[in-house]
Amino acid sequence: MDPKQKRERNTPEKMRELFERRTKEGWSLRQLASESGISMTTLNYWRGKLKREAGSTIKKVEASSESFIPIDLQPISDVTSGHFEVVMPSGCRVFVPHQFNPDSLAQLLGVLRSSC
């Protein structure tokens, strides 16, 4: 890089936009790093910083602007089973039994969102 050329600074606004795009596209953190040209270390730093600034836990952050996940409902041939399937934007599938813990499911979907 030319020493006279200033490097674009990572601002909270820019990083929020990147994380929103990640959610919209269904990208993993690694995919976001590849697409944005920003290192995984920097992205992890900003993810933590933005969560701390919001004064939220992971669950609360995921329940904010990043919580909308479009779903495609398909008829299940055996409706008496009471289970359903969640398909993440990345293609990851989760089969959920009719008796499930909503908090555990939310935590699992958060992990899948960041790794798939």
Image: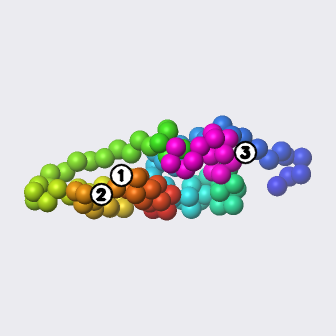
How far, Cα to Cα, is label 1 from label 3? Answer: 36 Å
Residue 62 visible (yes or no)? yes
Depth check: 78 or 75 in front?
78
Residue 38 visible (yes or no)? no
For label 3, the residue is 10
Q: Secondary structure at mark 3?
A: loop
* Amino acid type of the residue tagged 3 in the rendering: Asn
Crowding near pointer 1: few (<14 within 10 Å), some, many (20+)? few
For label 2, the residue is 100
Nearer mark to the viewer, of 3 and 2: 2
Q: Residue 55: x percent and y percent?
A: 63, 41
| Magenta residue check for 53 | yes
Nearer mark to the viewer, of 1 and 3: 1
Q: Residue 103: x percent and y percent?
A: 40, 53
Q: Residue 32: x percent and y percent?
A: 57, 55
* Amino acid type of the residue tagged 2 in the rendering: Phe
Depth check: 32 or 48 in front?
48
Rendered position, 50 above or below 89? above
Say how many tags the image has.
Answer: 3
Q: Residue at x 69, y 54 (%)?
A: 45
- The answer to whether mark 1 and mark 2 are in CB contact below 8 A is yes
Q: Residue at x 82, y 55 (%)?
A: 1
Q: Secondary structure at mark 2?
A: loop
Q: Residue 61: x percent and y percent?
A: 54, 44
Q: Which segment did they paint magenta?
A: 47-60
Rendered position, 57 above or below 95? above
Rendered position, 108 above or below 72? below
For label 1, the residue is 102
